[in-house]
Amino acid sequence: MALQDFLPSDVPMTWILLALLAVLFYLYAVHPLWTFKRMGIPGPTPLPFFGNLLSWFKDGIWNIEVNRQRVEKYGKVYGFFFGRMPILIVSDREMLREIFVKKFHALTNRTGKEMLLDTRPSGRMLTNLRDEDWKEVRSTLRPAFSGGKLKMMGPAINTCADQLVQNIAKFAETGESFDTRELTGAFTMDVIARTAFGTEIDSQRNPQDPFVLMGKKAFNVSIKNPLVLLYFVFPSVMKPILEWLNMDLFPSDATRFFYGIFDQLIALRQKSNEKGRVDFMQLMMDAHKDTEEEAEEGVKSHGQKRALTRDDVVANGFLFFVAGYETTASTMAFVLYNFALNQEEQKKARKEIKKIMEDRDLVDYEAVHEMSYLEMCCMETLRMYPPVADIGRIVDEEVKIQWLTIPKDMFVMVQVLAIHYDPERWPEPMKFIPERFTKEAREKRDPYDWLPFGAGPRTCIGMRLAMMELKVGVAKILMEYHITTAPDTDIPLKMKKGNQFPTPENGVRLKVELLNQDEN
C-alpha cells in the first residue's frame, strides 16, 4: 500500500512532505537543544544548528570576564551547546572531586569514540587514547618523568639555560625591549630536543631551523579553521571523510616532517645500538614492535603491556614535543612578566636563588626543590595563566555526580579559567600574590581550586619536567639580570580571546639590566 492510501484524498503530497521535513528538522536541529532543560540545568539559550556558537565566536575561550560572568549568571554548573553537542560546564568543588577521582571509571576519557579521529598522528596521541589503551601507553611512558630521570636531565637543561642567558645579554647591552616569549620558546624547544629525543637543534642560535619552524606550525591549530570547525559541528559527517582521506587536524607538512625526523632517530638508534639512554624516545623504542605482523597478531611484550607501534612512537613524540615546547615557554614568559610588574617579589626570589646557589655550579634537581619562593611565584603564575582554559571529559556510562545524573556520551568541561579567577576561592584574583602558595596555605586549600595540569589519574604526565625546566630557566636569568617593563609592555596583557591557550596579542615585551656584582 502507498502512503496516499492512509491519507485524506484532499491533502496534497507537498504539504505532507513539508510536515515531514518540519518534524525531521525539529528532531535533528531543535530536540537536542532541550537536553539541559530536561535535566534542570540553566544556561544561555541555544539556536538551531549553531547552539551557542555565535556567542562563543564573539566572546572567545580565553576571556576571564565572560567566564566569570557566566558563572555569576548561571551558577557553577550550566549547559552550553557547541552546535548540536551539549556540553556540561562545571566549576563546583565537590563535583570536580568526583569527576577527576571518585567517579573516574565513568569519566576516564577525554573524548568519545564518535569524536576520535583514527588518523595520523592524532589517533595515537596519549591525550586521545581511551580506556585500557590509554593506561598501557601511559604506564610505558611514565618512567621518563621519574625523579631519577629528571636528575639526569639537569646538566642538559642547564646548558640550554646558559644559552638563553647569553641570548638575553645583547638586549641588556642595547637596552632594547624584546619579546620574551620568543626567547623562552627557543629555550624550551632545545630542552625538549635534548632531554626527550637526545638530539641538538640549537634553535636559540638558529631560529630558522626546520625543526623550529615546523614545531611552531604544528602547534598552530585554530578552532576557527574551517576544517576544524566543520569537524566539531558535524562530527558524524566529517569523521569518516577525514579518516578516508587520512587527513589529520594538524598541518600535513608538519606531520610529514616529524614522521621523517622520528623515523631517522629510530633508525640511528637501532643502528648504533647505544646502551644506557633514558630519554623519552628510548623508552618508546624499547616498547616498540618492529613488525606489522606482530601488531596485527596482538603479540604482547614487556610482561602484560602491549608494545608500542611505530605510530605510537611518532604520535607521542610529536605530542610531547609540541605540547611541552609551547606551554612551558609561555609560562616562563608570564613568570618574567609578573616579576617585571612586581619588583619586591623579584628581589625576594633572586635572594633565595643566590643563597641556594652559593656553593653550586648547576641549578640541579636538589637545588630546584629548595627554591620554595620561586616555586610559589611559578604556581601563582600558573593560576593566572593556566596552560589551558578548560579540561574535557566524556561520560562513558550514565553516572550520578552529586545531585545530578549525567547521561552517557555527554561531554563535561571543567572550566579552569573560571576556577582560577573565582573570587570565592582566590580573593583579589587579578593580583599576583605568591603567598597564596605557602605550605600552610596549600594545606588549607581545596586541591581542586588549582588545576593548571589537571587532576587525578589523567593529570599531565610531563608536569614535573615542566616545573623543573621552568625553575631552572628563570633562576639562571634572575642570577644575571634585573627584569623590568618597557615602554611597549602591555599592562595588562591583551590576550587573544579566541585561543584555547594563553596567547598575548602583542607578545610579552620586557627589558633587562645586568645586575651589579653585589645586587640581590
Image (spheres, grey):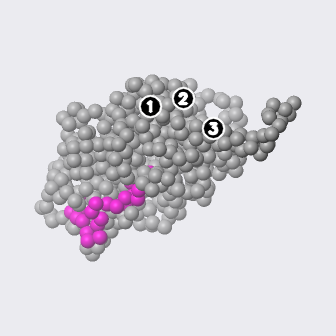
In this rendering, does residue 380 appear at all? yes
Q: Is residue 361 above or below residue 408?
A: below
Q: CA distance from mark 3 to mark 1?
A: 20 Å
Q: Is residue 334 above or below residue 320?
A: below
For the record, the magenta segment spans: 478-504
**Mark 2 packing: few (<14 Cα in 10 Å), some, or many (20+)?**
some
Q: Is residue 170 above or below residue 365?
A: below
Q: Tag 2's secondary structure?
A: loop
The three-letter code of the residue at mark 1 reads: Gly
Q: Position of residue 203 (x, y in %)?
A: 44, 62
Pick the front one: 221 or 376: 221
Task: Give the dominant element type of the magenta stretch: helix, strand or loop.
Answer: loop
Q: From the viewer's perspective, is 519 left or right of 3?
A: left
Residue at point 38%, 32% (across, down):
96
Residue placed farthest to the right in the image? 1
Q: Considering only order in the chain, which callout, 3 or 2, is on the residue closer to the N terminus?
A: 3
Residue placed farthest to the front in the image? 10
* Number of residue marks: 3
Residue at point 21%, 63% (across, down):
482
Q: Position of residue 313 (x, y in %)?
A: 56, 43
Q: Quadrant of the C terminus?
A: bottom left
According to the picture, the residue beneath numbered tag 3 turns out to be 27
According to the picture, the residue beneath numbered tag 1 turns out to be 40
Residue at point 43%, 40% (across, down):
43
According to the picture, the residue beneath numbered tag 2 turns out to be 408
The three-letter code of the residue at mark 2 reads: Lys
Q: Tag 1's secondary structure?
A: loop
